[in-house]
Image (cartoon, rainbow, N blue to C red):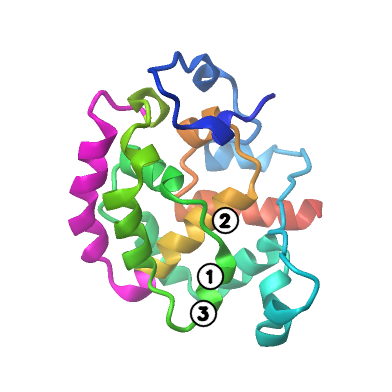
């Protein structure tokens, strides 16, 4: 299936027929129990020939699946709180498209995920021009994005980091737009099931 995520900011409203395609991943925890397909998780490519990143943070190049498994194991309450944050499914989908996030950014002690997400909501033109059908709303995406500033700003720091990690991990999964639209990928229990299955299949 062609992944239209590379062209999310068209000049005109588009008919997103792909949103109705069946997902490759289960939507419910019960569905995970009988799931037997192999899951692919993509690593982030590095730039340059010298190992600056690896020298500062050797774990930065670890497989995102291993990084996410460790984060979920160490900070389950932060991820549970993040999945219950004051975001609707529409807002979670919009955040997913706000910026192509990376787990490696959490390895920077001074990284502020709240500021990064707020800036994307305020200034990302593509986010503001996105077809509402992509996230499941008739409301203008610019209005949704601008309204989210306060919700993001109210997140405790660790909860914001968990939100960022969830968003970043979904960029490591080769989701099609119908899967971003259909699946509860921000839910702690769904994530734990995904990571648990992917670990067993790796």
Task: Using the numbered discs, state the Cα–Cα distance from disc 1 to disc 3 in whole angstroms.
Answer: 6 Å
Depth check: 76 or 22 in front? 22
Badge 2 crowding class, 10 Å Cα cut-off, few under 14, some 14 to 19, many 20 or more, is many
Please tell me which residue lies in front, 84 or 117. Answer: 117
Q: Residue at x 58, y 35 (%)?
A: 6
Q: Is residue 89 visible?
A: no
Give the secondary structure at mark 3.
loop
Give the quadrant of residue 64: bottom right
For the residues bearing labels 1 and 2, Cβ distance under 8 angstroms: no
Q: Position of residue 168 (x, y in %)?
A: 53, 57
Magenta range is: 136-159
Q: Residue visible at 55% across and 77% down?
A: 107
Percent from the top left, x then y, of residue 72? Answer: 55, 67
Report, in whole angstroms, how far the alpha carbon at label 1 lies from the one at label 2: 12 Å
User: Is 157 colored magenta in this rendering?
Assistant: yes
| Residue 169 disc label | 2
Q: Nearer the viewer, mark 2 or mark 3?
A: 3
Of helix, strand and loop, which one carries label 2? helix
Q: Which residue is mark 1?
A: 105
Mark 1 crowd level (few <14, some 14–19, many ≥20, 10 Å Cα): some
Q: Quadrant of the N terminus?
A: top right
Residue 167 is a magenta residue: no
> Crowdedness of circle 3 by 10 Å Cα count: few (<14), some, many (20+)?
few
Q: Are marks 2 and 3 in contact (CB under 8 Å)?
A: no
- Tell which circle, 2 or 3, labels the residue nearer the N-terminal end: 3
**To which quarter of the image does residue 47 belong?**
bottom right
């Amino acid at each position: 299936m062609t992944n239209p995520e590379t062209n999310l900011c068209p000049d005109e409203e588009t008919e997103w027929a792909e949103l109705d395609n069946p997902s490759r991943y289960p939507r419910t925890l019960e569905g995970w129990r009988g799931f037997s397909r192999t899951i692919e998780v993509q690593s982030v490519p590095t730039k340059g020939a010298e190992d600056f990143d690896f020298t500062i943070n050797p774990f930065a190049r670890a497989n995102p699946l291993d990084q996410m498994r460790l984060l979920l194991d160490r900070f389950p309450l932060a991820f549970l709180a993040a999945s219950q944050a004051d975001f609707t499914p529409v807002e979670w989908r919009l955040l997913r498209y706000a910026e192509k996030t990376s787990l490696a950014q959490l390895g920077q002690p001074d990284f502020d995920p709240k500021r990064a997400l707020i800036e994307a909501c305020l200034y990302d033109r593509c986010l503001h021009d996105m077809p509402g059908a992509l996230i499941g709303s008739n409301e203008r995406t610019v209005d949704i994005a601008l309204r989210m500033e306060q919700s993001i700003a109210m997140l405790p720091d660790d909860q914001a980091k968990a939100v960022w990690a969830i968003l970043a991990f979904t960029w490591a999964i080769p989701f099609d737009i119908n899967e971003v639209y259909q699946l509860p990928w921000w839910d702690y229990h769904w994530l734990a099931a995904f990571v648990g299955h992917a670990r067993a299949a790796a």
